[in-house]
Image (tube, rainbow, N blue to C red):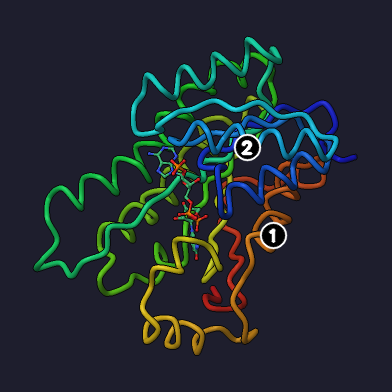
């Protein structure tokens, strides 16, 4: 098992892509911390992983609050004494055209998607530096690379995450900590279920592989980046998008 003995925090793992990532990391031997604002749901996901033979705990936390991020890290260390992997996956949308977008819609999205990653990364960094080992993976989006009408707030947060990823990668490389971003395309989750059919159809037409992605498509790539096989990869954005963005 490629991730045996590793301890991983996955933010926003109460459902969707984060849940699939947590399940995949657990399958590969990692001890995982399930986290989200919904504590009850976090318990359910952790219990399912345990029933499948994995190790998991649940910690209720809202990543937009620094105090929650610090508590998430503390509870992980209290339980397992180390942190090898942080997946900054928690994310939200509040779509609107720019002319109609409220300050609240802008601020909320930036606070969760970008500040949340800062809060959690800052909170784990000291421990990872001490261990001289770590993997940080930020879940960005093709929208951060291409832009999308109606998602100026979301696109800005996801583009911001890419700059954040590259800066953290440069800062922490000398301590054997890698930091990469994964950019999913159009993945079937609650987040995309909310899109209207016309938007879904137009998105589908932009996917060369001709199908929507699954949370598991993303999870397997994240697990690879967490493994020793990816030891020499840092500061990169890996697209998991069926070919939507080709750079
Ligand atoms: P979902 O809406 O299905 O799940 C979002 C997760 O984030 C939930 O577990 C939710 O848990 C958690 N979350 C939301 N706000 C907070 C918060 N303030 N603090 C902690 N956790 C929070 O989304 P997806 O699974 O689709 O998306 C996961 C990530 O992937 C996001 O960053 C998203 O931007 C990105 N992405 C998704 C794509 C897609 O097509 N689905 C495409 C590209 C990127 P809870 O409600 O318990 O807080």
User: Where does the image place residue 34, in percent across and percent down from the top left?
Assistant: 60, 34
Closer to the camera, 64 or 115? Answer: 64
Residue at point 62%, 21% (across, down):
128
User: Where does the image place residue 173, in percent across and percent down from the top left?
Assistant: 61, 33
Kindly identify which numbered label has been placed on residue 44: 2
Q: Is residue 19 left or right of residue 199?
A: right
Whether ligand 1 has any atom under 8 Å from the Cβ at mark 1 is answered as: no
Q: Which of marks 1 and 2 is in front?
A: 2
Q: Pointer 1: what residue?
A: 216
User: Where does the image place residue 232, in percent across and percent down from the top left?
Assistant: 73, 44
Depicted 33 relative to depicted 82: above or below: below
Residue 210 position by quadrant = bottom right
Q: Is mark 2 on a helix, strand or loop?
A: helix
Q: Is residue 66 left or right of residue 238?
A: left
Q: In which quarter of the image is the N terminus?
A: top right
Q: Distance between the residues labelled 1 and 2?
A: 19 Å
Residue at point 77%, 29% (across, down):
55
Q: What element carries label 1?
A: helix
Depicted 187 relative to depicted 219: above or below: below
Residue at point 40%, 32% (across, down):
62
Kindly identify which numbered label has been placed on residue 173: none
User: Where does the image place residue 14, in percent across and percent down from the top left?
Assistant: 55, 43
Depicted 30 relative to depicted 71: above or below: below
Depicted 224 relative to depicted 124: above or below: below
Q: In this view, does 145 lie to the left or right of 211?
A: left
Residue at point 54%, 13% (across, down):
74
Mark 1 / mark 2, whichever is N-terminal:
2
| Label 2 Cα crowd, 10 Å radius (few <14 / some 14-19 / many 20+) | some
Whether ligand 1 has any atom under 8 Å from the Cβ at mark 2 is answered as: no
Q: Is residue 176 left or right of residue 51?
A: left
């Amino acid at each position: 098992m490629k991730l045996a003995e590793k301890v991983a925090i996955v933010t926003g793992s109460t459902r969707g892509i984060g849940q699939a990532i947590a399940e995949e990391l657990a399958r590969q031997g990692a001890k995982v911390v399930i986290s989200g604002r919904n504590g009850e749901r976090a318990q359910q996901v952790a219990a399912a992983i345990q029933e499948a033979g994995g190790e998991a705990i649940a910690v209720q936390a809202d990543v937009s609050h620094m105090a929650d991020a610090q508590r998430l890290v503390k509870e992980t260390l209290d339980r397992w004494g180390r942190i090898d992997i942080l997946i900054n996956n928690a994310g939200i949308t509040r779509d609107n055209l720019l002319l109609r977008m409220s300050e609240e819609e802008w601020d909320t999205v930036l606070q969760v998607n970008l500040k949340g990653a800062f809060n959690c990364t800052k909170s784990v960094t000291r421990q990872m530096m001490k261990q001289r080992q770590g993997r940080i993976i930020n879940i960005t989006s093709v929208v951060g690379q291409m832009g999308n009408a109606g998602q100026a707030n979301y696109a800005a947060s996801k583009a911001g995450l890419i700059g954040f990823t590259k800066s953290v990668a440069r800062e922490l490389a000398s301590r054997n900590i890698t930091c990469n971003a994964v950019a999913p395309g159009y993945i079937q989750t609650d987040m995309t279920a909310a899109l209207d059919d016309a938007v879904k159809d137009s998105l589908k037409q932009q996917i060369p592989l001709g199908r929507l992605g699954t949370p598991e498509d993303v999870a397997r790539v994240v697990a690879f980046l967490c493994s020793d096989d990816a030891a020499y990869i840092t500061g990169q954005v890996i697209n998991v998008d069926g070919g939507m963005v080709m750079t």
